[in-house]
Image (cartoon, rainbow, N blue to C red):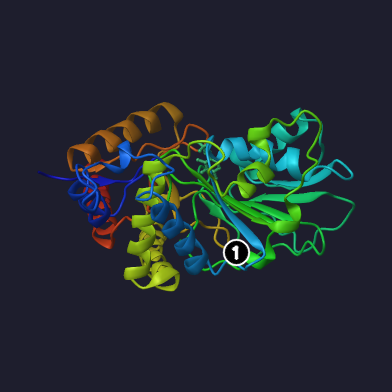
Amino acid sequence: MSRVYNFSAGPSCLPEEVLKECAAEMLDYKGTGQSVMEMSHRSKAYKPIIENAEALVRKLMNVPDNYKVLFLQGGGSTQFAMVAQNLGIHTGKAAYIKTGVWAKKAAAEAAHLGIKVDTIASSEDKNFSYIPKVEKISGDYDYAYICFNNTIMGTHYEYIPDTGNIPLVADISSCILSEPLDVSKFGLLFAGAQKNLAPAGVTLVIIREDLITETPREGTPTMMMYKTHADAESMYNTPPCYTIYVMGKVLEWIEKTGGVEAMHKRNLEKANLFYNYLDSSDVYHATAEKGSRSLMNIPFLTKETDADKAKVINDKFVKEAAEAGLVNLAGHRLVGGMRASIYNAMTIDGVKALIAFMDKFAKENF
Ligand SMILES: *Cc1c(COP(=O)(O)O)cnc(C)c1O
């Protein structure tokens, strides 16, 4: 068996230890004679699985007691609507900072649902290559919304805007548990699991209890109310049982390897290695500006500026990298070039192998 280094932006690589444990328990989970895939979510065997996952989220992220942890479905994209429907209920106004595709989609969804969206800052002027500085947000907003790590653009907030009494909502899909984060600074955090937590299928929501309303915007379906899921402890309907089980194992792996601080240290080491290489190269360069750079998603271009020639060289890069066991390096069409996603589960050896390949490719082609 040979495994590749997978630089996919999502679904993305999982720790090998976790995959092996899942494989070992596949046919008979702890003497139950069943796979977790086959189990009732109401069974005695399953209950500890979801409880363990929640307890570990609380412990690793230091979640205060007045927050609920929910396991929902519909991906990060469904949160764009749920946030608007459940939080946009007093003035019906919300502040959005537009830092790329995901923030724009979230703002568009809120507008679609009748929220008066104020775009209070944007980095669209420079193709979203930086995070605007908005230290303070004030106004009669029901909430303020940011995308904390921009998976496509490779940017990341190095500060948390001060919103006073306005609940701050952050999409942390692609950076959850990659670094310490002060949950108490936010009203609501959410993350689709398939970037840094688990396979696709579950979305983690951490919401301050006072934001769980019984009276969301008119027409909000039962399944779209945080209250429904909070009251039923994420068991209102069948949760994505197996994905939550794998998430529990990923969380155990984070704990075993030193927790979030240690994870952050390793992520800094990996990202610094890669950025230093890009910054000192005369062939490649990072697209995200210093001071706004993601530790998780790193888009980069070659020095070829002619669009047609760049396409040829980028395609060659992606193809030859894959042949060398380095897969999913194609860039997003909005940025071009290549993108290496180096989530928690990517090893430093994977980053070193990528740099070695890039060096060889540069010598052969430039
Ligand atoms: C991937 C991603 C999403 C969309 O997640 P889905 O689960 O596919 O809906 C939203 N926000 C960010 C930052 C992402 O990286």
Left or right: 236 in relation to 248: right
Q: Quadrant of residue 259?
A: bottom left
| Front residue of 298 and 226 | 226
Left or right: 79 in relation to 94: left
Decide: is 325 above or below 57: above
| Front residue of 241 and 321 | 241
* Residue in the picture at 18% in, 42% down: 324
Circle count: 1
Decide: is 181 above or below 17: below
The picture places residue 166, in percent across and down from the top left corner, at 80, 57
* Residue in the picture at 68% in, 60% down: 186
Q: Which residue is mark 1?
A: 158
Residue 283 visible, this angle: no
* Residue in the picture at 48% in, 31% down: 333
Left or right: 294 in relation to 138: left
Q: Amino acid at mark 1?
A: Glu
The picture places residue 358, in percent across and down from the top left corner, at 27, 49
The picture places residue 80, in percent across and down from the top left corner, at 65, 38
Q: Quadrant of the N terminus?
A: top left
Q: Secondary structure at mark 1?
A: loop
Decide: is 191 above or below 75: below
